Image (cartoon, rainbow, N blue to C red):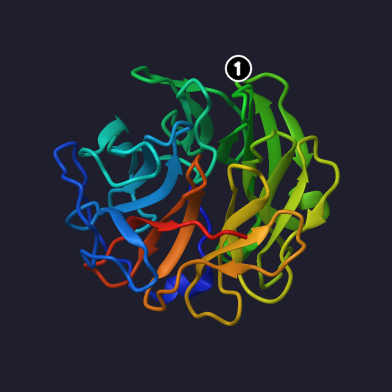
Amino acid sequence: MRRRLFVAAILTISLTTACGGEDTEEPDPGPSGSRRADRAEPLFHGGRRASAQNPAFSPDGRSLLFTVFQDGYNEGAAALRVLPLDDGAGGTPGAAPRTLLDERDKAAVNLPGSSWNPRGEVAFASDRAGGGRDEVWVLKPGGRPTRVTEHGGSSGYLEPSFSPDGTWIVFQESVEREGSGDRAALGSLWKVRRDGSRATKLLDGPATRSDNRQPNWAPKGDRLVFQRRDEDGEDWALYVMNADGSGLRRLTRGAGEHTDPSWSPDGRSVVFSSTAGGLELPQIFVIPADGAGAPVRVTRNPESYDGAPSWSPDGRWIAFESHEGGEDRPSSLWRIPAPRI
């Protein structure tokens, strides 16, 4: 499927939400309407029961790309929107979000992290071509979507991430096996040129009996971070490898669900969502990219799932989605000061 993975704890929350999300929306301060005890600040709430997810800072930090799921959390058609930020530093909203793509009966979903290239294009996955398969697309500013990949079979091409120079896109190929739901999936990682040429498999999920998802390109273009789970395994861990598929190494240790990784702007740290320490609901953590150090917890709100983090280009802020559960609590967008580690 086209959705990002969310840990099992979230599935216990009631997610029965419905449509919303027009250009006429005003920036809503979020479910609580004020700062949380952990100093997180609200950025945007979709209004009514639409779910705002997957924040990704633009290269200049002056706007935030995100996905709006029309029928609730990870459900139904999905649109791409951009929230202007008034100070260019991951700051507070300066205007209502504008729509980049909204096709009502189709889903356009971006990856939190490196969804943009330096020319202001955004990469996303969509089933807009029909046939029941997700492909990788790129949207130029003010233009129409350009298809990057085209493939047969039943697998989906998802979670595209731009290289820093915008010439390559890395993405996940999701392959469903016979079995029960998400646990039956195996994911491979590929890269492809922006023009659709030179598709290269970097990591073969079925061959390595592993599920690999959500690849994000490092700021220098030399490495990739992603989440991985062994076949029929219980927990997700974070891994790093070189951009050519070599040098695979594990980044996180210990029990828990470690997901949604993306990079700090200097490439020295990785931000992610985790249940580390036995948390019931995931929170945001940061870990040194070389693995030499324990994860540092960033958000502290035990009543909500916090995930899909994205670091501002100036290093000051981390944007994320937060879901407090219940029919009247769709996911909303927040920011929190980035830790110094």
Residue depicted at x 53% and y 80%:
279
Residue depicted at x 36% and y 65%:
323
Image position of 101 with respect to 25: above or below: above
Locate residue 47, reporting x and y percent: 19, 54
Residue type at mark 1: give it: Asp
- Near mark 1 (Cα within 10 A), the count class, few <14, some 14-19 or many ≥20, is some
Image position of 314 with respect to 185: above or below: above
Residue 178 visible in this rendered orientation of the protein: no
What kind of element bears circle 1?
Answer: loop
Locate residue 244, reporting x and y percent: 80, 35
Q: Is residue 219 left or right of residue 102?
A: right
Locate residue 154, reporting x and y percent: 59, 41
Locate residue 275, reporting x and y percent: 56, 74
Q: Is residue 272 left or right of residue 66?
A: right
Number of numbered discs overlaid on the protein picture = 1
The foreground one among 175 and 138 is: 138
In the picture of the structure, the residue carrying the numbered disc 1 is: 195
Image position of 246 with respect to 239: above or below: above
> Which quadrant of the figure has residue 34?
bottom left
Q: Is residue 269 left or right of residue 253?
A: left
Residue depicted at x 42% and y 20%:
140
